[in-house]
Every structure is written in C-alpha cells, then in structure tokens.
Amino acid sequence: QVWQIRLDLHLLNHDGNITDAASIAGIVALCHFRRPDVAVQGEEVTVYTPEERDPVPLSIHHIPICVSFAFFQQGTYLLVDPSEREECVMDGVLVIAMNKHQEICTIQSSGGIMLVKDQVLRCSKITAVKVAEITELIQKALENDQKVRKEGGKFGFAESIPNQKITAFKMESAAVDTSNVEEQAEEIIAKADPPSEVFAKPILHTPGTAQIGEGIENSWGELEESEKEEAVEEEGESEEAPASDCQKMETEETSTMKETNKDEPIVLSDSEEEEVVILEPQELPRRTR
Amino acid sequence: VAGELLSDEGYRADGRRPTELRKVRARMGVFAQADGSAYIEQGNTKALAVVYGPHEMRGSRSKALPDRALVNCQYSMATFSTGERRRRPHGDRQAGELALHLRQTFEAAILTDLYPRSQIDIYVQILQADGGNYCAGVNAATLAVMDAGIPMRDYVCASSAGLADATPLADLSSPEESAGGPQLVLALLPASGQVALLQLSARLHQERLEPVLEAAMAACRATHALLDSVVREQLRQGCGALGD
C-alpha cells in the first residue's frame, strides 16, 4: 500500500512563461503539503487523522526550479523570463531547470533555434543566480506560513491576496490636473456647432430591420426582392389591420412592401406575441417562386 | 551508478572506451519507391528513415506556407523494437514530442525557401531500440534527406552522452541509459558548431555540463565524418554506374 499524490495546476492568467511559474507553484505545493501520519507494526497499519497526530510533510530531496530563456534574431538577443508579447515574437526558447546546489535537472531547447555551446553555458550560469534567489524566496514564504499557523494567525489563499496581487487586475489611478477645466470647457462649447437634430423615430424597411437616423444609403431594399420569396413567416409588425390572418399576409406582403412609404413612421409593437397565429397544415401558404 | 557504467580499468559494460562510439553501418537508397531513404545501425540500434518530397501539399491546401516548404515528420517505434511488445507505434505523447523536435530541427537545416507552398515528409521508424534511438533516427533522416536530393545547410548529426562519476561517456547504450545517470541528447550542425537540439534529463552538476557537452559534440563530429563517407561512397557508386 502506498500513498498517491495528485498535483493539479490551474493557470489563472497567462502573461508569458507559464513553464517557470508552473514549476515553482508545483514544487512549493509539494513542499507545503502535509500527509496523515502512519504507524506500521508488522502487518498492522494505523493511519492517524490530523486531529490525533500532526500531519507529516513529504520528503523532498531537492527543489528544482525552471528558468526560461527566449532567443531572438538567430541568437543575437537573449531574454530571461519572457512576457507574453515577447513569447509571440521569439525564435525559440531554452528551459533550464536547476536546484540551489547548482545541479542541472533538465535542459530543453525547442523552437528550432540554433545555439552555440557558449550560449548554453552562459545561460546555465544565469540560471544558477536566479534559482538561488527564488529558492530563498520560497524558503521564506514556507517558514512564514508555518510560523503563522503555529501562532494561530490568519493564513491561506484569501489572506495572501492583498489588493495588488494575484487575481486583482487593477490599474493605478493617475492624477489629472483639473484646475482650468471649466474655462476651457466653456470656450469649446461656445465655439462648437450646435448638435444636429436627432431622429428618434425608427423607420421600418422590412420585418425585422429598422433604421434610426439618416445613416448611409440603405441597400436592404434591393436584397428584399430576391429574399422575399424565401422569407419565412415573421411575427408581422403591424403595418395593416391587426385582424389579418397569416395566409393573407404572406401573399400580400410583397405588394404591401412597395406601397409602404419609407418615411412614414411605423409603430413597432412592443409585444411580439400579439399576432401569433397557429397554422393548420392545410392552411400553409404556398410559396410563389 | 558509476561502478556499473565504468570499470576500474576504464572500460564500459560493452567493452568500449568512454569516448568510443558504437559501430555505425549506414546505407542510402534502400527503397526505390520513396524519394529518399536511408538505413542506419548504431551498435544494436537500427533506424530507418524515408523522405517524400518536395511535393504538393496533401490534405489542407490552406496550411501551405507562401514562402517556404512545410516539413512534416513522424517518429515511430516498431512494435518489435523493444524488449516488451509496444502497444502503440506512434501517436503516444513521447513520439509526438520527438516528431516535433525532428520537425523543428530539419526545418532549420533544410533550405525550405527553395520550395514555397510545398511539403516535405520525413518518416523515421526505429526497428530496434538499444539506446540512442532518437539520435539514430536523426542521423538516418539526414541521410534520407540527402538521398532525396533536398538541399540542406549542413549535416544534422545527433549523439547522446552521459556521465560516470567524472568521466563523460559518449553514445549511450540502453543499459547505460536506464542506469539512471544524466543523459544528454545533442543534435549538431558540425560545420558551424550550432546546436539544433539540446535535451538533458536527470541531474548533472553545472560544472560538469561543459565536459559532457564537449563529449557529445565530439561524438557528433565523429558521426558526421562517418555519414559523410557513406554519402561519398554512394555518390561514387552512382557516378560509376552512370559512367559505364
């Protein structure tokens, strides 16, 4: 019998270099994890609940951290920890994973970039520096969390989100000088042309389309000729007497369209359910083609 | 680990010296149907590569690149290639990843600008896996591309390297790979010394990186010399046949 551990990584926001972030998140989660304590006596196995005995951490041999390098222009430029914009235009990426004892855990080059040996060695030196910093950060964070838990203070995900971090997308407010604004505004209003008349009445062209204001030359009318025969029954906007039944409307639709004066304001009924008519099978209008 | 890999006198498990490569046998033009083909044996590892192209885009024409050729690769391991029968020759994640690496390597090495809107297919099949499978695949693919007459910037030579204590080992065999020590896979363009692919697995101290890299590069250069002689021999035979 063995313990099975599952690590689920959720990416909340992708702003480049998810490899590094994911590697740090993964290893820190494993370091932070506590499993129930177990006592084995011969064949008997007792698993203690967290209340009975403090849970035990996993035995982590070392902490590998990934560092990514983006290459540009056939290796001329090198960027550590590329952002999302940089990743879009990079030639390729080199990932080096190292732990704080300066042991390289993995190297992967991908993207079809051509590297030179010196570049790889230089990258590994840069990685050593970065990994040392990050490992120290991790140790501090873990110690901090342990201390806070022991002292009974607040801990956990919610507490680690001050306003400026993780899921808060906040833009800093910029100061604006509003001292002379009133004078400038009055000046501009006095010089400006009066606003053009606003057309509030909608103009109906075909069922389902309406126009408010002048706009450009409307070409819906031309399409109407070819499409009218294929037009499925619409809940007709009431241009004619509300009492007309659907069959009549279908065949009369074509003629009434031409009669309608474009500028005549048409009342669009708010409720489209007033004119619902249930068709009997024999009453289905035959379409003229 | 070090004791298994290297004996006290400095011999490896199969009797080689640390920087010695396994015996390489290669042949180009093994199939008449394909545009280019090659077969390579590195020790007990046997790899076959077949190249079709450049030809018109198969499948979706929309994927054709307007200024260069598309390189399409497949890396497959035969079901009988390993000790236990393999379920899936290709289509598993590892094969997909290796195919992607193959594609990126050869896209950089082949002069794709000469064949816009066309496609070059490279199929690599590992017939027997005894360590250095991917490397044998790359070497076979290089020869096959040459056999097809597709111009390349340079040979692409690949080799693996490892470490036994402080001694770098070149061209790892299967038992050496599974011993658990660090393994480096390197694909090199020998003339310019550029590295097309670099992969390291298992832990290696930073200071040991350079010697292992150097050993891998030396192995790649030695492979290059071998492949070059195979190509020249093939050419000589071809010219001889034409001359007669």
Image: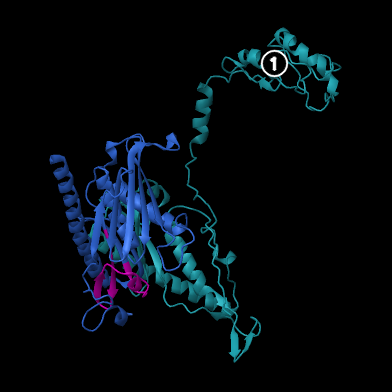
Residue B52 image position (x, y, % from top left): 34, 43
Residue A191: horizontal and vertical position, in percent?
A: 50, 22
- Does B174 lie within the magenta span? yes
Residue A43, compared with residue B233, is above or below; it is below
Q: Quadrant of residue A53?
A: bottom right
Q: Is residue A254 above or below residue A29?
A: above
Q: Going 59% across and 89% down the picture, which residue do you hit?
A: A40
Is A44 contained in the magenta span? no
Please identify the quadrant where the N terminus of chain B is shown.
Answer: bottom left
**A87 to the left or right of A193:** left
Quarter occupied by residue A273: top right
Residue B223 percent across, percent down from the top left: 21, 60
Q: Amino acid at mark 1?
A: Glu
Which chain wears cyan?
A: A
Chain of the residue displaying label 1? A
What range is drawn magenta here? B158-183
Q: Is residue B188 left or right of residue A43?
A: left
Kindly identify which residue carries mark 1.
A229
Viewport quadrant of the C terminus of chain B: top left
Q: Nearer the viewer, residue A7 or B133?
A: B133
The count of marks equals 1
Q: Determine crowd level at label 1: few under 14, some 14-19, many 20+ residues with C-alpha closer than 10 A.
A: some
Residue A283 drawn at (x, y percent): 84, 19
At x 29%, y 70%, the residue is B162
Q: Residue furthest front?
A: B244
Residue B113 can be seen, yes or no: yes
| Residue A252 image-quadrant placement | top right
Which chain is tinted blue? Answer: B
Which of the pair B44/A28 is nearer the observer?
B44
Q: Secondary structure at mark 1?
A: helix
